[in-house]
Image: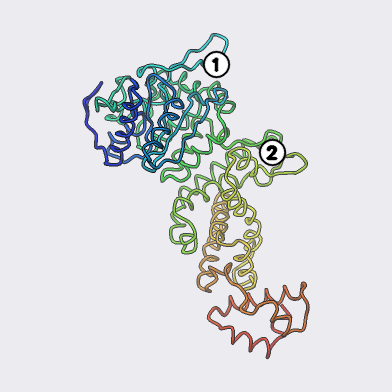
């Protein structure tokens, strides 16, 4: 690769070519003079030899919405398979400075946007957005490596900043304009900068760190929607280099902004200390997370990136569990504040993380000051059944926490897991009584109620202890030794 504008050829797949041909055919059909360019990430990835399905088409003389409305009608007239189109409106107050339209072609959603230019008035930080030139658009991009275009007409790579290809070659992360202005324009770019540096193992220019001052941090805190922040965090916590990102957040002083808590809580003067503990716990997870690779149930129930995501986020949130704030009439923990308010995290992920954290007391009480042989078998089973499929995460998060607290007896947490597997209890949360409630009522001549519930629980404990036993064996035992189940 060379510097400046290049006549660089990149490998186009058959599907990509069909998509590009569809755009060009519509342009000709509609008698438009619009210059069509693929912008940003797709160009970067192609130049790096990576596959990309993130195709953004940039227009030089009309909005994405105006283009897509006409194109969708064209596709329908050609009986092309289409799923309609969508438009994301701009919201400068939340640093969403570009209206985006999307259209489905060949089962791939393509974003269509106009090239962006902008003016700032003397008394306003909110820019006036207008259709710009390729040069204006390139220089308003977050990073030089994301400022490249692929011209669908000339089939050439266009590097209007004269830095994009050079920085790809040299593995440099830099902003096309002064980084302070770039970050104030859209403060989320701080997180994006770190994401690309981590993803590609590129070196961040020193002036980027210098630009992340209190004004930029305040803008990140005020201007960026929490959903957009969570999208970045979700990527980071699923990545192989997760802790590297957390280190960068801590280094530049945005860790507390990213993992934001309600300011009306009772955390008081302990806030800084708790944040430090949160980061320290994530640091321990980073050094110990390979232990989770050998956990059979965990790796059956979750994908590897999900395990990493739940482990890190649970560890980060755990130190905040004992601090609360008032949410309307309800008292909520700061864990809820980080996840629900700070990230607006989806319900499934929220419930799993909260379950991991809320079960910390259970495992701590079970093992606190006790040897394994002092714990009743029933307590092991009940723990697994209460914690469910995340029981290993519950144990390991507590193990990491005890390591942070420098507990000298942390080996018993791994011994606990070994006991569970040695006694075939790892999936005790799936055990259902071999004998149903109706049959139990007949055998013991009882009615539904607490006694029935206790007997059914006793059946589960017995089945866990005798994991190879049959229904017939259990029935015989119920008839010959009923007291065995009544006294538990």
Name the one closer to the observer, 311 or 413: 311
Name the one closer to the observer, 323 or 433: 433
Asked if 111 appears above or below 215 in the picture, the reply is below
Asked if 332 appears above or below 476 in the picture, the reply is above
Name the one closer to the observer, 21 or 30: 30
As helix, strand or loop, the secondary structure at mark 2 comes to loop
As helix, strand or loop, the secondary structure at mark 1 comes to loop
Report x, y in % for residue 469. Answer: 55, 83
Name the one closer to the observer, 13 or 416: 13
Nearest to viewer (mark 1 / mark 2): 1
* Residue ID at (49%, 60%): 301
Q: How far is disc 1 from disc 2 in space, using C-alphas?
A: 34 Å
Corner quadrant of residue 449? bottom right
Report x, y in % for residue 257. Answer: 57, 32
**Quadrant including the N terminus:** top left
Residue lying at the far bottom in this picture: please name it: 480
Residues marked 1 and 2 touching at CB (< 8 Å): no
Considering only order in the chain, which callout, 2 or 1, is on the residue closer to the N terminus? Answer: 1
Mark 1, Cα crowd under 10 Å, few <14 / some 14-19 / many 20+, is few
Report x, y in % for residue 267. Answer: 69, 38
Which disc is residue 267 wearing? 2
Corner quadrant of residue 279? top right
Could you tell me how many numbered marks the image carries?
Answer: 2
**Quadrant including the C terminus:** bottom right
Report x, y in % for residue 255. Answer: 54, 35
Residue lying at the far top in this picture: please name it: 122
Which disc is residue 125 wearing? 1
């Amino acid at each position: 690769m060379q510097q400046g504008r290049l006549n660089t050829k990149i490998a186009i797949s058959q599907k990509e070519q069909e998509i590009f041909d569809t755009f060009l055919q519509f342009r000709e059909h509609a008698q438009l003079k619009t210059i069509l360019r693929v912008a940003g990430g797709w160009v970067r990835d192609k130049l790096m030899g990576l596959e990309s399905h993130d195709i953004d088409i940039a227009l030089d003389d009309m909005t994405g919405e105006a283009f897509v409305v006409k194109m969708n009608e064209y596709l329908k007239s050609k009986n092309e398979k289409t799923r309609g189109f969508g438009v994301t409106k701009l919201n400068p107050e939340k640093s969403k400075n570009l209206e985006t339209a999307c259209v489905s072609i060949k089962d791939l959603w393509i974003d269509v946007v106009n090239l962006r230019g902008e003016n700032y008035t003397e008394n306003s930080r909110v820019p006036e957005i207008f259709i710009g030139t390729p040069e204006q658009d390139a220089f308003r991009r977050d990073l030089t490596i994301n400022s490249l275009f692929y011209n669908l007409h000339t089939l050439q790579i266009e590097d209007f900043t004269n830095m994009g290809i050079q920085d790809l070659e040299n593995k440099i992360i830099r902003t096309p304009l002064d980084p302070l202005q770039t970050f104030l324009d859209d403060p989320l770019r701080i997180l994006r900068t770190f994401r690309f540096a981590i993803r590609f193992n590129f070196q961040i220019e020193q002036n980027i760190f210098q630009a992340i001052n209190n004004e930029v941090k305040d803008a990140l805190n005020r201007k960026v929607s929490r959903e957009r922040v969570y999208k970045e965090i979700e990527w980071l916590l699923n990545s192989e280099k997760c802790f590297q990102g957390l280190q960068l957040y801590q280094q530049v002083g945005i860790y507390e902004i990213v993992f934001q808590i309600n300011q009306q809580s009772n955390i008081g003067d302990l806030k800084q200390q708790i944040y430090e503990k949160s980061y320290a716990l994530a640091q321990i997870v980073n050094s110990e997370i390979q232990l989770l690779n050998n956990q059979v149930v965990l790796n059956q129930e979750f994908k590897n990136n999900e395990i990493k995501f739940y482990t890190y986020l649970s560890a980060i949130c755990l130190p905040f569990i004992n601090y609360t704030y008032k949410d309307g009439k309800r008292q909520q923990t700061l864990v809820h504040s980080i996840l629900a308010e700070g990230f607006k995290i989806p319900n499934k992920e929220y419930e799993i993380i909260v379950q991991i954290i809320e079960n910390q007391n259970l495992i701590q009480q079970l093992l606190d000051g006790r040897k394994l042989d002092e714990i009743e078998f029933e307590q092991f089973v009940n723990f697994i059944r209460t914690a469910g499929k995340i029981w290993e995460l519950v144990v390991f998060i507590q193990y990491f926490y005890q390591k942070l607290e420098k507990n000298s007896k942390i080996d018993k947490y791994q011994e606990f897991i070994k006991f569970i597997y040695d006694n075939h209890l790892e999936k005790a949360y799936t055990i259902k009584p071999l004998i149903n409630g109706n049959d139990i009522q007949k055998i013991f001549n009882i009615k539904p109620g607490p006694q029935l519930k206790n007997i059914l629980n006793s059946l589960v404990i017995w089945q866990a202890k005798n994991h190879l036993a049959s229904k017939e064996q259990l029935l015989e035992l119920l008839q010959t030794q009923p007291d065995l189940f009544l006294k538990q």
